[in-house]
Image: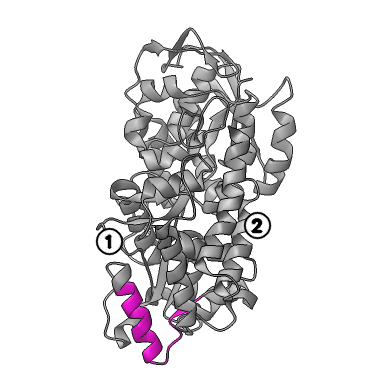
Amino acid sequence: MKRNIRLSTVALGGAALVFALAGCAPGTGSTGGNETTGEISTDISGVGDVTLTVWDQEVRGGQNEQMEQLNAAFMEKYPNVTIDRNSQSFDDLATTLRLALTDADAPDVVQANNGRNTMGQFVAADQLRPLDDYAEAYGWGDRFSESVLQYSTYSDDAKVFGDGSLYGLPQVGEVVGIFYSKSKLADLGLEVPADWTEFDAALKAAKAAGETPMQLGNIEKWPALHVFGPLQGDYVDAEVITDLGLGNAGQSWTTPENVEAAATLQGWVDAGYFNDGVNGTDYDAAWQALAGGDGVFLIGGSWLAADLGDAMGDDVGFFIPNTSAGTPATTGGTGLPFTITSAADNTDVAAAYLDFITSDEAMEVLAETGNLPVNRTAELAPDSGVQADVFTVFGDVTGDGSLLPYLDYATPTFGDTMGQALQDLLAGQATPEQFTEALEADYSEFVASNE
């Protein structure tokens, strides 16, 4: 059950959020494009009166609540700073941000989608400030795992995603895992599968017992990406998946390991481990079927936890099997990172704000407002329930395992390419080899265009 403790604004502004702020570090308080010159400071108490314009998309209940708490706490800690917040929906922000960043009066801090078609384009256009100097000054590399920071990292020309300079910091995490009915698993006489071999055995046992082993609704095409991605992690090295998923050069989809992962997924269909007609089943209908008692497992994202918890109560659990190497690896990512625009008037203030809203103490506020904090996740997990499982899995994957990228990050068209290829694979209209060849064609063409 989620704890009811809430940190007050006064507490956050005082002892609960006392930071060990360094004096000065090499870098700059203002930049042009991807260049940094001069000095930066992590002490903003003496900068005078400053208005910091922040654009975010944290509009839903708990998301908005945590931003309101943290913004108020930041202004209490720094009375010289006023935050001018512009909060928009995800779709609205995606529409307005491109134009706003070309304006002379662009906002100082913005949330920018990680992908190549958003953050990548902003980096290539020199519209975002690289944050490496502030990362060193504040110790962000110690606070965040590499598997998280890679999703906010680009080369200066934005051709390489996942390596280069840091351009943003996220607050929240996302993770794909396996939801399951505890009662049904118990009736089968099974424990939670520890690895993918045990998971496959559990599917076989569920089928033999007359249960629907696993629900999947794939009419929208993208849900199957979240089934293949975690499964791929058991066959393919995490570094290879990361390069493929981020659209970086040097890898291939047509390897025996990728083919074997595809063959396993198709084999699940042939063995009757999914509900009938997965390609004609709606995504919401699939998780609702599990909630209604039809099925033992469902592979899906942490964003389903609240709805499944409401519907199933203590009967729903969440886990990710270990790979054959003994560590967890699964698809996941972060919420939209907060970035500093190249037009920001005072980047020291902007960087202090990023540090504050992603601090260890801020993670407590996120957890208390029903969000999945990207750091301290396992430590801040609720005491019980499916959200406790989600927090634990994300903490394990980002701490000791591999958080693998959403595969549709790879190219601007890869979501459509892979969505159709997976539908064909699930329908038996493509072999595993043909499936990987279709992905290779899109990936290799994009990589060649970036050379």
Q: Residue furthest top?
A: 38
Query: What secondary structure predominates along the stretch shown in magenta?
Result: helix
Q: What residue appears at the point 37 percent right and 90 percent down from the top-left corner?
A: 208
Report the amino acid beneath label 2.
Asp
Crowd class of label 1 (few under 14; some 14 to 19; many from 20; radius 10 Å): few
SS state under label 1: loop
Q: What residue appears at the point 48 percent right and 85 percent down from the top-left corner?
A: 294
Q: Which colour scheme appears in the figure?
A: one colour
Q: Give the percent coordinates (x, y) of residue 65.
A: 53, 47
Marks 2 and 1, Cα distance to the nearest angstrom? 30 Å
Tell me which segment is drawn in magenta. Answer: 198-215
In the displayed structure image, the side of residue 282 where residue 169 appears, left or right = left
Badges 2 and 1: C-beta atoms under 8 Å apart? no
Q: Based on the displayed image, in which of its 4 quarters is residue 427 positioned?
A: bottom right
Q: Is residue 214 magenta?
A: yes
Q: Nearer the viewer, residue 25 or 23?
A: 25
Q: Give the percent coordinates (x, y) of residue 180.
A: 40, 74
Q: Is residue 55 visible?
A: no
Q: Nearer the viewer, residue 136 or 404?
A: 404
The residue that mark 1 highlights is 324
Which corner quadrant holds the N terminus? bottom left
Picture disc at residue 416: 2
Q: Earlier in the sequence, mark 2 or mark 1?
A: 1
SS state under label 2: helix
